[in-house]
Image (cartoon, helix red, strand yellow):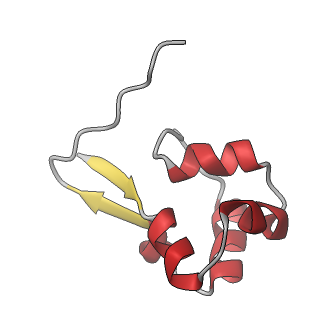
Amino acid sequence: MGIIVNLDRQLVEKKMRLSDLADQVGISLANLSILKTGKAKAIRFSTLRKICEVLDCQPGDILEFQSGAKPRKRRSP
């Protein structure tokens, strides 16, 4: 089971850069990048709400549950 993050799809649809979204939401580009790549283990509801406000979308447009999807492995430093 896995949660798939479709943030990149929303950014393309809204013609917005990740850095612009980070500025408008008020979080670091690094943290938003971690979310976008599916490496985040959690997201605050307040952050999700701000992202949805800026992108004018629903949480389900960003996060998707796929049964049987394997979580992405972390790369070793």
User: In which quadrant of the rendered image does the N terminus lie?
Assistant: top left
Q: Hey, which residue is sitting farthest left in the picture?
A: 68
Q: Is residue 71 left or right of residue 7?
A: left
Residue 64 placed where, x, y %? 35, 64
Residue drawn at (23%, 57%), measured in percent from left and top?
A: 66
| Quarter of the rendering occupied by the C terminus | top right
Is residue 19 toward the left or the right of residue 45 in the image?
right
Q: As rendered, which of 49 and 6 lies closer to the eye? A: 6
| Residue beneath the point at 60% across and 51% down | 43
Q: Which of these two is toward me, 58 or 31?
A: 31
Residue 41, given in percent of the width and then of the height, sits at 51, 38
Q: Is residue 58 visible?
A: yes
- Image point (44%, 76%), residue name: 61
Q: Is residue 65 above or below residue 13?
A: above
* Above or below, 6 relative to 27: below
Q: Position of residue 12 (x, y in %)?
A: 51, 75
Q: How many marks?
A: 0
Please state if 65 lies on the left or on the right of 18 as rendered.
left
Query: How far across and down, in percent of the image, does residue 74 sit?
Result: 43, 25
The answer, for residue 57, to whether it is visible in the render is no
Q: Which residue occupies the extreme top position in the image?
A: 77
Q: Residue furthest bottom?
A: 56
Q: Give me the residue at 69% from left, 81% from top.
A: 53
In front: 75, or 50? 75
